[in-house]
Image (cartoon, rainbow, N blue to C red):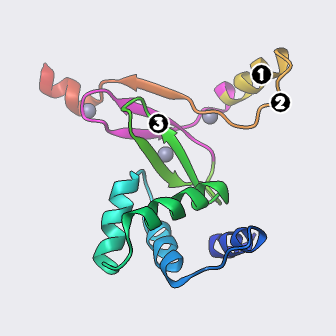
Amino acid sequence: MKSARQVFIEFLGDNGMSLTHQRRVIVESFLENEGHFTAEQLYSRVSKQAPDIGQATVYRTLKLLVESGLADAFDLGEGVTLYEHHYGHAHHDHLVCAQCGRKVEIVDETIERRQAALAEENGFTLTRHRMVLFGICPACSGAAA
Ligand SMILES: [Zn+2]
Ligand SMILES: [Zn+2]
Ligand SMILES: [Zn+2]
């Protein structure tokens, strides 16, 4: 399997772009951090390391990370786009606490298979999906009791 960096460099090359110093700093910062983050959070991490890199550059590079398949972007109903690593990471869905925003990664093979079957029954070839379950996490339901 190719490294994430290699995949990104090839994607840039295929699109007539190169791995500039700024893009390299942004990609390294992206790869260092697992979990879910917003574009602003990535920008604030990058700008601590390299104050000369502007917000627009970070946002554009993040878009390239999604297009290259390294990152996945999704909206968990909070009106904010979140990003996470995608390349080399197993598929998962999310449980989200509607109160504190805590996210738990979940996967269930039976549900996965049913989703594929449902798509097929409707003549669709499934390319991707996002299942998000909203609820109240144990910490929040405990505090409310
Ligand atoms: Zn799934
Ligand atoms: Zn909670
Ligand atoms: Zn996740």
Residue depicted at 70% across the width and 70% down the height: 7
- First to last magenta residue range: 91-111
Queried on whether the Cβ of the residue with tag 3 lies below 8 angstroms from ligand 3, the answer reads: no
N-terminal label among 1 and 3 = 3
Q: Which residue is mark 2?
A: 125
Q: Is residue 36 left or right of residue 24?
A: left
SS at mark 2?
loop
Which quarter of the figure is the N terminus placed in?
bottom right
**Ligand 1 occupies quarter:** top right
Disc number lying in front (1 or 3): 3
Q: Position of residue 57 (x, y in %)?
A: 46, 67
Q: Which residue is mark 3?
A: 75
Could you tell me the amino acid type at mark 3?
Asp
Which quarter of the figure has residue 34?
bottom left
Residue depicted at 32% across the width and 39% down the height: 102
The image shows residue 114, relative to residue 72, as above or below, that is: above
Q: Which residue is mark 1?
A: 119
The image shows residue 1, relative to residue 52, as above or below, that is: above
The image shows residue 2, relative to residue 134, as above or below, that is: below
Q: Position of residue 38 (x, y in %)?
A: 39, 51
The one nearer the camera, 84 or 23, is: 23
Q: Is residue 36 left or right of residue 11?
A: left
The one nearer the camera, 110 or 25, is: 25
